[in-house]
């Protein structure tokens, strides 16, 4: 028999907000769950969506849990850019190696050159929003939100 579930409310979701100065305990299961949500472009904290306006722009707050997505720091996503660059380079290296192995012993060097050149341009653009959400998930795992990180409704 189906029983209706209580919808998650903001109040219920954020009962465990970290107090300023409270020690941080890393929960690996929670961290992996948040990264899993992040790679699906969902809010790392509650799994809600959409958290993007269009493909690239992150909303200021999550509509599901009220989490401030940019966490109030001007250069907050600098780490996301680094993560994006590393992921794009990894995609390039793995893609190049797979194409090389698939066509060995006579790799089509001209085709590889054009495909790889296009890949290094396209991959960072495609991966950009994912790097932001994964960066946010890593930050939330290491620095859980405080009350200041939650949108307050009067
Ligand atoms: Zn959320």
Image (spheres, rainbow, N blue to C red):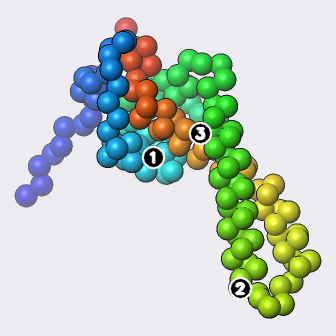
- Regarding residue 57, the answer to whether it shows in the image is yes
- Regarding residue 126, the answer to whether it shows in the image is no
User: Residue 70's x, y, as percent?
Assistant: 56, 25
Residue with the most extreme top position:
154
> On the picture, is 116 further left or further right than 143?
right
Nearer to us in this view, 97 or 36: 97
Specify which label sits upstream in the sequence, 3 or 2: 2
**What secondary structure is marked by label 1?**
helix
Residue at the spot x=39%, y=42% of the render?
31
Residue under label 1: 35
The tag on residue 102 is 2
Tag 3 near tag 2, CB within 8 Å: no
Query: What is the C-alpha distance between the residues marked 1 and 3?
Result: 11 Å
> Which quadrant of the figure contains the N terminus?
bottom left
Tag 1 near tag 3, CB within 8 Å: no
Residue at the spot x=43%, y=13% of the render?
148
Residue at the spot x=88%, y=71% of the render?
113
Query: What is the C-alpha distance between the residues marked 3 and 2?
Result: 33 Å
Residue with the most extreme bottom position:
105
Residue at the spot x=18%, y=43% of the render?
5
User: Residue 119's x, y, as percent?
Assistant: 78, 62
User: Residue 50's x, y, as percent?
Assistant: 50, 40
Which quadrant of the structure image shows residue 150? top left
């Amino acid at each position: 028999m189906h029983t209706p579930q209580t919808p998650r409310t903001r109040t219920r979701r954020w009962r465990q907000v970290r107090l300023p100065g409270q020690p941080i305990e890393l929960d690996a299961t929670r961290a992996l769950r948040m990264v899993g949500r992040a790679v699906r472009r969902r809010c790392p904290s509650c799994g809600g969506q959409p958290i993007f306006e269009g493909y690239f722009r992150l909303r200021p707050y999550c509509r599901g849990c009220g989490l401030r997505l940019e966490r109030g720091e001007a250069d907050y996503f600098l780490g996301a850019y680094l993560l994006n660059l590393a992921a794009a380079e990894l995609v390039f290296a793995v893609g190049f190696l797979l194409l090389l192995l698939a066509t060995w012993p006579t790799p089509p060097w001209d085709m590889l050159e054009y495909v790889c050149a296009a890949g290094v341009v396209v991959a960072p653009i495609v991966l950009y929003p994912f790097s932001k959400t994964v960066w946010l998930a890593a930050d939330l795992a290491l620095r859980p939100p405080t009350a200041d990180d939650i949108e307050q409704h009067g």
